[in-house]
Every structure is written in structure tokens, then in C-alpha cells.
Image: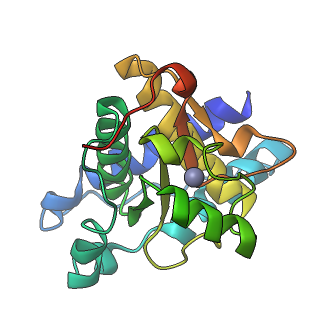
Amino acid sequence: MSMADKIREAVARLNARQSYRPDHRIRRAPERVITPPVTSNEDQEDGSLRQSLAAIADRQFCLGVKYSEQQMRADRDGAHPDIIEFGRLLVKRMRRLDVPMFESTMWRTMDDQQSAYVLGHSNAKPGQSAHNYGCAVDVIHGVKGWNLSRQEWSIIGHVGKELAAQRGFKLTWGGDWQRLWDPAHWELTEWRSNKMVRA
Ligand SMILES: [Zn+2]
């Protein structure tokens, strides 16, 4: 099974488990005792994927005030409609998995880009980033920020790519960049011909 299939399965399993939630009061038949199969490498991988999902899930935080405040952080005004819609839906899908995410940056002005470049927060000079034209969004974790493992980011990458495919958004994920790996970053693949100008 490919990594993408494994992630899809782990996400589906978590979704299925969550759909039982309202029925906690229903008593279930005692589970049959099943002899555990010999653990294969594949099982171990699936297990670690589930652990990764569990590690970034934080239901309590999703219900709190800080999570709600984070949702208002990014300046979306006049950004490209696909980016606005994508950011909103990615956060929503992760929320369904109890994973708190928010859009930290959408627009970045030329001045902010200059500061970010000088400080080493961005590798792009002013005018070279899709953020300067409302064509990119950074989506980060509500509690851990950028500080997720590669496998944890790959789950978010998978969910985002699936969403983009379903909606027909042509997006590039910074987590696929070999050289300047930037897993929080999503941009319009063709941002250079879709530049937005602020009113
Ligand atoms: Zn970015």
C-alpha cells in the first residue's frame, strides 16, 4: 500500500470512529477476544500513522476560545477566491479530525516580505512570493505551530491535496519541495498568472 493510501485509511478510520461519538451511551456487545496477528512492518507503519494523528489531535483546544480567535488571524481580504476557500475547508476538515489548525498568513505586503526575508523567515524577496499577491496561505497547528514531525505534516498534506483534487483547485504544497521544504505553505500553482491586487 502506498503512503497516501495508508494515510487515507487512517483518516477514514478516525472519521468512522468519530461517527460513533454521539452513541456513547449505547452499550455495545463485549468485544470478542481475538488473538493478535504477528505484527508486520506494515502494521507497525499503520500504528505509527495512527499515533501521529493522535499526537496532533486536541479536541479540548478545538472547543476553546483561543482556537476561535486563531481563525480570525489571517488577512483574507481580496485574496484569490480559491485560496480563501481552500484555507477555510482545510481547517474545517482537520477540525473534523479534532486537529486544531489555522491560517496564520495569507497576504504578505512587500514591506513584510522584506522583513521576513531579512529575518530568514522566508526565502523569497519582495515580489517573489505568492503571498505578495494573495495567492498563498500558510496553515499551521493551533498548539504546536510549525513544530510537527514529517509524518504529522504528511497527514495534513494528504488531506489538503485530496481536498484540492475534489474541488478542482490547482495548488502546490510546500511540503513537496525538496530544497526549501515549507509544509505549512499552499499556493496556486499558476499564481504568476493569477496575481491579485489589493484595492
Ligand atoms: Zn507561505
**Which image quadrant for residue 146?**
bottom right
In terms of depth relative to the viewer, which is nearer, 77 or 169? 77
Q: Could you say where residue 20 lies in the image, as x and y percent from the top left?
A: 23, 53
Q: Could you say where residue 149 lies in the image, as x and y percent from the top left?
A: 71, 65
In the rendered image, is residue 10 in sight? no
- Seen at 52% across and 68% down, the residue is 56
- Seen at 67% across and 44% down, the residue is 174
**Which image quadrant for residue 113?**
bottom right
In the rendered image, is residue 176 in sight? yes
In terms of depth relative to the viewer, which is nearer, 93 or 107? 107
Whether residue 180 sits left or right of residue 101 in the image: it is right
- Seen at 60% across and 31% down, the residue is 172
In terms of depth relative to the viewer, which is nearer, 137 or 175? 137
Whether residue 36 sits left or right of residue 144 in the image: it is right
> Height in image: 22 above or below 19?
below
- Seen at 74% across and 28% down, the residue is 2
